[in-house]
Image (cartoon, rainbow, N blue to C red):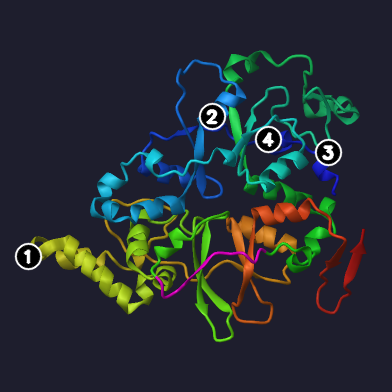
């Protein structure tokens, strides 16, 4: 096991992290959509309110207030129900408590001095967020390979010799005067994305794992969830049962394998037009959903019918019907990072190309791919075939790989080079 996991602590990952602002279950779906747009892993922790605002909470009391994590796919699936489609204005004003799935095991509070390896073990067991107190004792500095004593930061030789140069002051006996009551209930929230981002900066310490193929490391998870393109898109929401929240949209081929054409997932719906996506999820097939209505004649006819019904005879008589219809063009696409929710109907447009990698892709390449696309997973396809789906790689799979050294690791070299095998 790499020493980076033993000598680093959770506090190293919290430097520069903003203070967490609790999102309460009494907030509306509309507020949740805006909050998710600024979140990591396409979801937000949801909390119950304190019984008394001025009360001092223990970690157990705070854990009991945590409800679960709400993601973008949960909201789109909720808005796609018949009741919500009939009255979208009422739907987005619904309390989040009616949408979020309670699961208190997804978050755990830990001390800043918790070893990184212990935090990774928690995440491998299903924890998606770590709640870390913001301690003034070590605020504003990342102490790599720090020495710890009773959970407090101590100066090492380098820090004491260079304290005058970097202006870092550590008080190991008591916190600063501003760290009393004002910081007692301040926390930051670490996600698995934060951990992967930290690890990609330590690739040298993880060698030779980063250059090894995901197939040789056993990272590929073959137990993925899929739905055929011809089935209703809403069927995907009934198949969600694990982590990450994703369903592959596939087309069967004669030899019994499947070709991936798209996906329905929280990461793909992260910054979409939620109301338009909900309509598409309820009315289109899975294939139409991932391709978008502009690419399918049947989908366009369904949308035109919905638009004409919404506009009504009165608008047409006043000469504004054609104007309303022109609004439903490629310029009014569903996936628009600048607008997460729109009060009116608009064109839904899918993203047909799923995020994929080859079975020979290196672990470092897959990690970089996930971070660059802010994705929770990458679909794995055959190396010499056309989009034949093999499995999926998620955060949990990567964490399991980097914390367990295999018996032998084969490192990929550029074409024409040599292949090196490392033995334990």
Dot placed on the residue nearer the N-terminal end, 2 or 3: 3
In the rendered structure, does residue 224 fall within the stretch colored magenta? yes
Q: Which mark is residue 15?
A: 4
Q: What residue sits right under mark 1 in the picture?
A: 317
Q: Quadrant of residue 415?
A: bottom right
Camera-side mark, 2 or 4: 2
Q: Count the labels in the image.
A: 4
Mark 1 or 3, closer to the camera? 3
Q: Quadrant location of the C terminus? A: bottom right
Q: Which mark is residue 7?
A: 3
**Residue highlighted by disc 2:** 64
Q: Earlier in the sequence, mark 2 or mark 4?
A: 4
Q: Residue at x 22, y 65 (%)?
A: 307
Residues at marks 3 and 4, CA–CA distance in whole angstroms: 16 Å
Q: Secondary structure at mark 1?
A: helix
Report the magenta residues as a range. 221-231
The CA span between labels 4 and 1 is 61 Å
Q: Position of residue 30 (x, y in %)?
A: 36, 43
Q: Are marks 1 and 3 in contact (CB under 8 Å)?
A: no
């Amino acid at each position: 096991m790499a020493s980076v996991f033993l000598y680093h602590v959770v506090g190293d990952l919290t430097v520069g992290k903003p203070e967490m602002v609790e999102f309460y279950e009494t907030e509306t779906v509309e507020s949740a959509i805006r909050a998710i747009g600024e979140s990591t892993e396409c979801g937000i922790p949801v909390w119950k309110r304190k019984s008394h605002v001025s009360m001092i909470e223990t970690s157990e009391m705070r854990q009991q207030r945590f409800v679960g994590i709400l993601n973008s796919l949960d909201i789109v699936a909720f808005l796609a129900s018949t009741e919500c489609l009939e009255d979208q204005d009422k739907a987005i004003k619904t309390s989040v408590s009616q949408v979020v799935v309670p699961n208190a095991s997804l978050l755990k509070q830990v001390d800043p001095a918790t070893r990184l390896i212990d935090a990774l073990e928690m995440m491998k067991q299903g924890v998606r967020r770590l709640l870390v107190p913001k301690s003034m004792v070590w605020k504003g500095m990342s102490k790599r390979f720090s020495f710890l004593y009773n959970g407090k930061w101590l100066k090492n030789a380098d820090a004491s010799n260079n304290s005058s140069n970097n202006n870092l002051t550590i008080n190991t006996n008591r916190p600063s005067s501003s760290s009393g009551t004002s910081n007692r209930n301040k926390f930051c929230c670490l996600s698995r994305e934060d951990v992967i981002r930290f690890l990609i900066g330590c690739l040298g310490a993880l060698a030779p794992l980063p250059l090894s193929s995901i197939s040789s490391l056993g990272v590929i998870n073959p137990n993925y969830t899929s739905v055929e393109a011809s089935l209703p898109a809403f069927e995907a929401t009934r198949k969600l049962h694990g982590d990450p929240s994703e369903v592959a949209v596939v087309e069967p081929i004669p030899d019994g394998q499947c070709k991936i054409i798209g996906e329905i997932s929280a990461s793909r719906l992260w910054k979409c037009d939620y109301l338009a996506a909900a309509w598409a999820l309820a009315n289109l097939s899975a294939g139409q959903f991932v391709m978008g209505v502009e690419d399918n004649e049947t989908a366009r006819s369904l949308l035109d019918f919905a638009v004409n019904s919404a506009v009504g005879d009165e608008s047409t008589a006043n000469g504004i019907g054609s104007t309303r219809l022109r609004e439903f063009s490629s310029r009014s696409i569903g996936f628009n990072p600048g607008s997460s929710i729109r009060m009116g109907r608009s064109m839904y447009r899918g993203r047909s190309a799923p995020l994929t990698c080859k079975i020979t892709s290196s672990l470092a390449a897959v990690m970089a791919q996930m971070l660059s696309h802010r994705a929770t997973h990458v679909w794995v396809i055959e190396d010499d075939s056309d989009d034949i789906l093999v499995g999926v790689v998620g955060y949990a799979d990567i964490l399991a790989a980097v914390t367990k050294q295999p018996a032998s690791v084969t490192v990929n070299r550029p074409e024409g080079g040599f292949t090196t095998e490392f033995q334990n």
